Image (cartoon, rainbow, N blue to C red):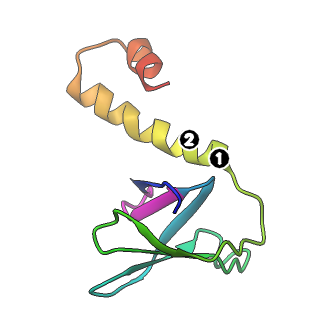
Amino acid sequence: MSTFRLSTTQRNKSLLLCKGFSYTIDKTTNDKIYWKCEFARTLECKDRIHTDPINTIILHQNNNHNHLENAVSNEFQLFEEKIPDGAVNYNESTQTIIDNCL
């Protein structure tokens, strides 16, 4: 199936990034995690992804979006995650940290 990355929202919730779309956890069971599109409420998007409980593989994806993907937003999300880590863990200038995150 598709490749994906895990991230976190600004409120420190789990975020799944896949093919230019972002998903948040809808519900969790013992054998699956159900993810809903980030636009499930605002645009009434019906797309869902199911992963195994340890988020290693996508078990199901219905590809039923009613909007375009936003790959730039996903890349920006990953970039924002790298900057604080670089600032805390490395003794480098701000410009060097930003350059390394790009």
- The numbered disc on residue 71 is 1
Asked if marks 1 and 2 touch (Cβ < 8 Å), the reply is yes
When asked about the image quadrant of residue 81, the answer is top left
For this rendering, which residue is in front, 87 or 29?
A: 29
Residue shown at the point (62%, 47%) measured from the top left: 73
Residue 3 relative to residue 90: left or right? right
* Residue lying at the far front of the rendered structure: 1
Q: Judging from the image, what secondary structure is the residue with disc 1 in?
A: helix
- The numbered disc on residue 75 is 2
Residue shown at the point (70%, 77%) measured from the top left: 45
Residue 24 relative to residue 74: left or right? left
Give coordinates of residue 38: x percent, y percent. 59, 68
Q: Is residue 88 above or below residue 8?
A: above
Q: Residues within 10 Å of mark 2 (few under 14, many from 20)?
A: few
The amino acid beneath tag 2 is Glu
When asked about the image quadrant of residue 69, the answer is bottom right
Does the magenta-highlighted stretch encompass residue 98?
no
For this rendering, which residue is in front, 58 or 25?
A: 58
Residue 30 relative to residue 48: left or right? left
Give coordinates of residue 95: x percent, y percent. 44, 13
For this rendering, which residue is in front, 73 or 4?
A: 4
Q: CA distance from mark 1 to mark 2?
A: 6 Å
Does the magenta-highlighted stretch encompass residue 15?
yes
The span picked out in magenta is 8-17
